[in-house]
Image (cartoon, rainbow, N blue to C red):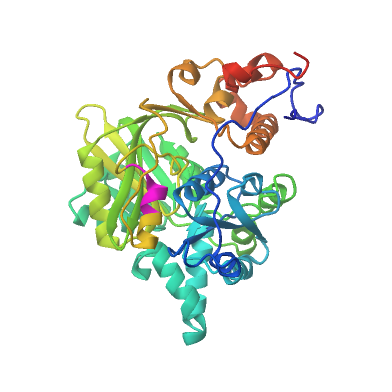
Amino acid sequence: MSAVSVNKDRTPKLENELRIYSDAPHAVPCVSIRDRHSAGLEEVCPKVTPTVLIAATSRWFPTARLAMALANAGCVVEAVCPHGHPLSKVRAVRRIHIYSGLAPLFSLANGIANSSPDMVIPGDDLCTRHLHHLYRRELKRGPKGAAICNLIVRSFGSPESFPIVYERATFMRLAKEEGVRTPKTAVINSLDDLRRWITEFGFPTVLKADGTSGGDGVRMVRTFDEATTAFHKLQAPPLFARAAKRALVDSDKTLLWPSLLRHQSQVSAQTLITGHEATSTVACWQGTVLAGLHFEVVNKKYAAGPATVMRLLDNVEMTSAVEKVVRRLNLSGTHGFDFMLEASSGAAYLIEINPRITQVAHLTLGSGRDLPAALTAALLGSNLQPSPRVTENDIITLFPQEWMRDPQSLFIQSGYHDVPWGEPELIRACIRHALNNNQSKPRKRREQAAAPNSADSFPALIKPELNKTHHE
């Protein structure tokens, strides 16, 4: 057992020590094919263990949670990610390959060469773009690039889908062709296009930049002045000062190349659907959905931010929409889909696709709702063996998001608080990051509900039976 050590100059003083016993079951130990051979285990363990490479460019904690779930499903897990990534805090990851934001394709190719994975799973949108770019580069090399090309196709599906998942307007048109309910959407290339859109559809309206996620590239506007300002900001490349700050202070280099290359983003407009946000995440294989999770968003950290509490849904329209899109694009791997559930009718409107994992992809919620088990079975060509359901509660309280939003939230007690109790180092890293991030963004803090700033709130995330100090 050990205590959390926190820099007192950067985070609130924590008088309570976090004492966590690793009482949860450890991840299923995995042995590589080479290790099996050297140990003479071929006859004892004839089944090949699939290797999954999780690739990440940003320090997003859900990638570590997915690594844990894949290992428990029977995979060998390796990762290519920046130094100090949360993936390095979990025992499920056998080996880390360092990602450099200044040499992204080299980093990914090196990680693939050294791990020989059966599948690569991207942890964020930029990583997906890099892998698609790597596919195009290796395709030009002919037979020498065939191995990487085949891996990326196996991991994502048809290469024809690669550009479509970034182009919001193109994707929405394709979904509509499949009979999926969607809001009206159009590409906005100029202020004249914007005026014509507003003249036809009025306010409020939604403007979105291609290639963004987490609400960063979305603006709801109510006047033409707001629309003009939002259009210019969404279209412009990231400011170099912002990209440099994120690289130096936050160790996040995701904006460096977009800033240096000065590429403008494609902006699209969507009619506003009034209602409740919902989201789906699926595991799919060659155009078929193998497992899926559908949720309604209950709470968010702030208006345009990520969800902090979700409610599990059984929504036929969302399920059908996802299946149609996956089949049309011939997708493989993990993908997320965002919806709006119309307040007046309950109708589900598909509003975008996320070609990567989402923050709930690791959850094992029973038959048809276990993405890691479904992917493992697809890689092995075997029957699906889902893990035990982690909870019967339909309310999922995400950690540390809801705790940071409101440490006294009733959902922490009434919902399933998704804390990785078996990985204390990951919990500590998650808490430090969350507290430091909350202090470093004062403008966002004004939009958020109160966040914890004293030791009094800290025990809210500790199991009751473990909420003791070392001195007791």
Q: Viewer-proximal residue, 470 or 397?
A: 470
**Residue 433 percent location from the top left of the image:** 67, 36
State the extent of the magenta-drawn residues as a range.
369-375
**Residue 365 percent location from the top left of the image:** 36, 36
Q: Residue at x 48, y 72 (%)?
A: 135
Is 221 placed above or below 193 here? above
Q: Main secondary structure of the magenta part?
A: helix
**Residue 318 percent location from the top left of the image:** 25, 41
In the image, taking residue 314 as reference, residue 255 lies left or right, namely right
Q: Viewer-proximal residue, 117 or 176?
A: 117
In the image, taking residue 174 as reference, residue 436 lies left or right, namely right
Q: Residue at x 59, y 59 (%)?
A: 258
Q: Quadrant of the C terminus?
A: top right
Residue 194 visible in rendering: no
**Residue 289 percent location from the top left of the image:** 29, 53
Q: Quadrant of the N terminus?
A: top right
In the image, taking residue 298 as reference, residue 16 lies left or right, namely right
Q: Quadrant of residue 160?
A: bottom left
Q: Residue at x 50, y 35 (%)?
A: 305
